Amino acid sequence: MGSRSHRSVTAQDVAKLAGVSRASVSRVFGNQGNVARETHEKIVKAANELGYQVNFLAQGLNRKRSQLIGVVVARLSDPFRSSLLEGLLNEIQHKGYQALVTEVRGAEELETTMRRFTQFRVSGVIVTSGQPPAELVKECVQHGIPVVGINRHMDIPDVDFVCSDNKMAALLVAEQLMRCGCHSIGWLNYQQSTWSGINRGDMFRQAMTEKGLLGDCDFQHIIAEADGYEGGRQAAHRFCAEGKKLDGIFCANAQLACGFLDGMRENGLDAPTDFHIIGFDNTPQTAQYSYRLTTIHQDVTETAKRVLSCLEARSHDPRIVQRMEKIPVKLVLRNTSPGQNE
Amino acid sequence: MGSRSHRSVTAQDVAKLAGVSRASVSRVFGNQGNVARETHEKIVKAANELGYQVNFLAQGLNRKRSQLIGVVVARLSDPFRSSLLEGLLNEIQHKGYQALVTEVRGAEELETTMRRFTQFRVSGVIVTSGQPPAELVKECVQHGIPVVGINRHMDIPDVDFVCSDNKMAALLVAEQLMRCGCHSIGWLNYQQSTWSGINRGDMFRQAMTEKGLLGDCDFQHIIAEADGYEGGRQAAHRFCAEGKKLDGIFCANAQLACGFLDGMRENGLDAPTDFHIIGFDNTPQTAQYSYRLTTIHQDVTETAKRVLSCLEARSHDPRIVQRMEKIPVKLVLRNTSPGQNE
DNA sequence: CAATAAGCTGAACACGTGTTCATTTGATGA
DNA sequence: TCATCAAATGAACACGTGTTCAGCTTATTG
């Protein structure tokens, strides 16, 4: 009990106990180079006996690359974003990496964040929010660090993107509303929306046009002044106060949809009797009894898999052609725009 | 454009450009040791010119400690847990650390996770879920790594705990239900609950006794067979099917509370007309129009601050006496058990 | 002016691992 | 038996930083 600061056990100690050189120990735990079966066993045994563990800092320093992956998140209070993070964490660990998670608000914070990532020699960076400034990305690329963005398609060279298929979502929603006989259609979105919000609106309008619906139908753009549940609720109140009417509404995300629905209820209107409403994200809340909201489901697991696939591909060869992957979505039919799920 | 692999700029390069020794550069960026004002400026200028950044892996290797903090999370789909993580991330970054986040399911996963933390020489470990096995903690302590648990008080030597004040919560709820004239009181919890769930129940019963309520009142323990919203909802259905009645219900968390409320509504009963119901966690959802749930509010920000304070204290001196901090809670009065918020 | 102290600086070692390169070992074929 | 070759091994260098210690310069005090 006298030994105050326990010097941590190193590969050298293992080598001495096993009666081999430190290089062989390194070969065993680095999973490369040839080691005789017998030597291998001696080393593993000695390592277990001493409780040896590789020092990742030293390993990363030497390899010029740590097995860390930087993840930029924002607004975790949004249930969809937290479930997305959950999916990413799973896949990251499954592939043998560790997640370096940073929450970010402004653009300047993102800058210092990205720098820290490079200082830790991360194997890759995943941006789930905000657009990565082109210069910072260039800095990463120079260091040989791959960057992937989620749910936004921007044209930054050498950066891959993975995005839910908003066009497919728009078509599914347009077909559903048509099938239900809706004639006056609305699109609800936050005023200062994200890229994905805007893109979903564009795709929806485009889908309506392709289906030849814009002729017979009203198409209104409802603008929420705030984001999230309260934004949707207030939008509904103003909507009613202005005496407007719609029978089919598509919302940029689940929070807005729930808020709008509740706002309408406060005004004595409800779905599906008075109107149909369809959300985006399929968060747990939308399935609950008080909402039973029909929504577009994003496949978080598949998204996470594709993201890591992009990272590994570009890590292997930094100059491959830019990828822009679209993840198929599903329409989950519930009470606010009913029908038969297949 | 010919230089293929850009060798990263090192402290040596900065030293050469500034015309000083590498040691001085290290002193400037390590924030210790004395450096003349003039030399300092020369070094900073040279560093900016070259775009120098400290290599955290090398720094950590030398200091035997990285500026990483390991965070163990579980079930991020629970809104409270994600908001807790959000609070922790903020405080961690604010203090100049970086978060190494791991999601964990079984106990064996937690073991490999903790090992990885030590392999990265983290400055501390925060466990938000499950109880850290004593042996693993001992391993951390041997390496000089402080461990803090959130919302559970176990008696593991050298591990600090930060927990919302469940006794205070119980008293606030008991007083509120008493004030509203409730006579038959219920406590709803998940069958295989966490430590905090069980403790909240114990404290509630104790508070009821202290207030002298257990004599006049019924006190029932309602057991949910599943966790989360669906668990609460099913519990309500069974509760009604068995013909039971209660006029005041306290729930172990917000998800259970929302589920139970919706389940009662499906049976034609609603709060506050037919019964009062109070939840725990004050998640965003509980504030929404469809619920307006009276709940106990946990101060996530304060919790995060105390956690990091514990880490830094024990990091400074590993053998200080074990801390068990209780964070005050608030009762947020809403529709399901109305009253006046002060 | 001499003696002392205080503040800066640079050389050198340590941190723990990956990887190259030369050397040794053992096996195979003629 | 000897020549050839592949596999296995160990010595040495590299990765980029923190920190000690001795030497240097400059200011302070008697």
Image (cartoon, coloured by chain):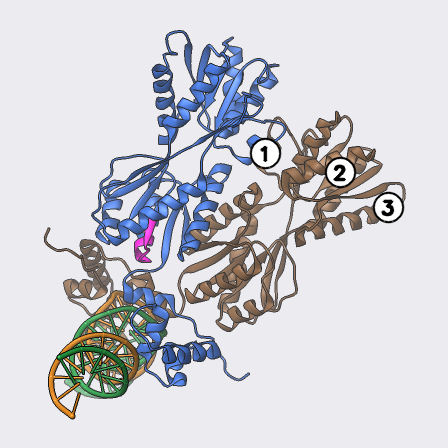
Chain colours: A brown, B blue, C orange, D green
CA gap between label 1 and label 3 equals 34 Å
Going by the numbered disc 1, the residue's amino acid type is Gln
Mark found first going from the N terminus, 2 or 3: 3
Which residue sits at x=42%, y=9%? B218
CA gap between label 2 and label 3 equals 18 Å
Same chain for the residues at labels 1 and 3, yes or no?
Answer: yes
CA gap between label 2 and label 1 equals 19 Å
Mark found first going from the N terminus, 2 or 1: 2
Magenta highlight on residue B123: yes
Is the C-beta separation of discs 2 and 3 under 8 Å? no
The answer to whether B141 appears left or right of B248 in the picture is left
Mark found first going from the N terminus, 1 or 3: 3
Going by the numbered disc 3, the residue's amino acid type is Gly
Which residue sits at x=60%, y=29%? A288
Closest to the observer, C26 or A209: A209
**Residue tagged by mark 1?**
A285
Location of residue A95 with respect to B83 vertically, above or below: below
To which chain does the residue with label 3 belong? A
Going by the numbered disc 2, the residue's amino acid type is Ile
Labelled disc at residue A43: none
Closest to the observer, A277 or A173: A277
Q: Please, what secondary structure does the residue beneath circle 3 have?
A: loop
Q: Which residues are magenta?
A: B117-125
- Looking at the image, which residue sits at the far right? A215
**Residue tagged by mark 3?**
A212
**Residue tagged by mark 2?**
A249
The mark closer to the camera, 2 or 3, is: 2
